[in-house]
Image (cartoon, helix red, strand yellow):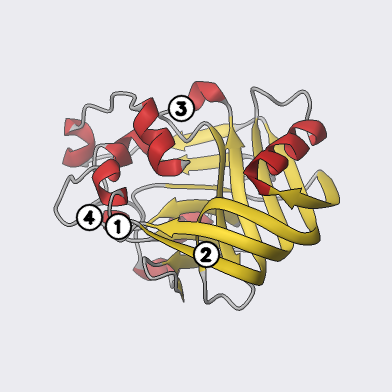
Amino acid sequence: MAYNEMFQYSIISALMDGVASHGPPVARILEHGDHGLGTFQNMNGEMIVLDGQVYQMKADGSVVHIKPTDTITPFATVTRFKPTEQRRATVVGKAGLEALLTGLFPNAKNHFLAVRMDGVFRKVNVRTAGGQTKPREGMVDVCARQTVHTFAGVKGTIVGFRCPQYVMGINVAGDHFHFIAEDRQRGGHILEFETEGDVDITAAQMSNFHLELPTEDDEFNDAELKLQAQGIKAVEG
């Protein structure tokens, strides 16, 4: 796949309906990109793909380096990341990053962005889902048991995407980021953050979007897959 083309396996509405038992090996996802987000079988933790390496961020805030041939994913989004814009800036919160990205890409409201931030963070608030307790348990119920952690004065990397509003239900509309510490021992889904001075922000606009849907998957075929916009905002906000 060319640089800065977005590849996605399955859709976020499938996770909302609890479709998380099956999927391809993570190794096959890596054929399409080296930068991304996702989850693992039964929604057991958060996935971050950084420089082609895959990490599982667990409910206790810890991180495991994953062997991609041994693990499957029911949902993932990746790209071969090649930044087209870069800045050094102090960023106060998700709102500050949203404004910065909009300034860097003023004509990209209806396009996708791939984003990376590297530096020291004054604080990072993350959450991590611990996984389904039964088949077809939806993501709202899974995330009701999520754990929240705050990391202070930590050096690390934020990886993620901005998706346009019209893909809500296919992906998460808006900004969606995961964090991993430089020591690869802590991480999770970003709830809020603040940098400690300037950090390096790199990003690229993406105009090509490739979607692969599950096949021969009874869970996916039986799911209603109706848009649950408020539920998605609640669990991914």
Q: Residue at x 24, y 45 (%)?
A: 141
Residue 168: assigned label: 3
Q: CA distance from mark 2 to mark 1?
A: 25 Å
N-terminal label among 2 and 4:
4
Q: How many marks?
A: 4
Give the quarter of the image for residue 57: bottom left
Looking at this view, is 101 or 66 the one in front?
Answer: 101
Mark in front: 2 vs 1 = 2
Looking at this view, is 195 or 22 the one in front?
Answer: 195
Q: Are marks 3 and 4 in contact (CB under 8 Å)?
A: no
Q: Which residue is mark 2?
A: 150
N-terminal label among 3 and 4:
4
N-terminal label among 1 and 3:
1
Check disc 2 and report its element: helix, strand or loop. Answer: strand
Mark in front: 3 vs 2 = 2
The disc labelled 2 sits on which kind of residue?
Thr
Looking at this view, is 171 or 70 the one in front?
Answer: 171
Q: Position of residue 43 (x, y in %)?
A: 31, 54
Q: Which residue is mark 4?
A: 132
Q: Is residue 220 visible?
A: yes
Q: Position of residue 136 (x, y in %)?
A: 17, 45
Q: Which residue is mark 1?
A: 41
The disc labelled 4 sits on which kind of residue?
Gln
The disc labelled 1 sits on which kind of residue?
Gln
Q: Are marks 2 and 4 in contact (CB under 8 Å)?
A: no
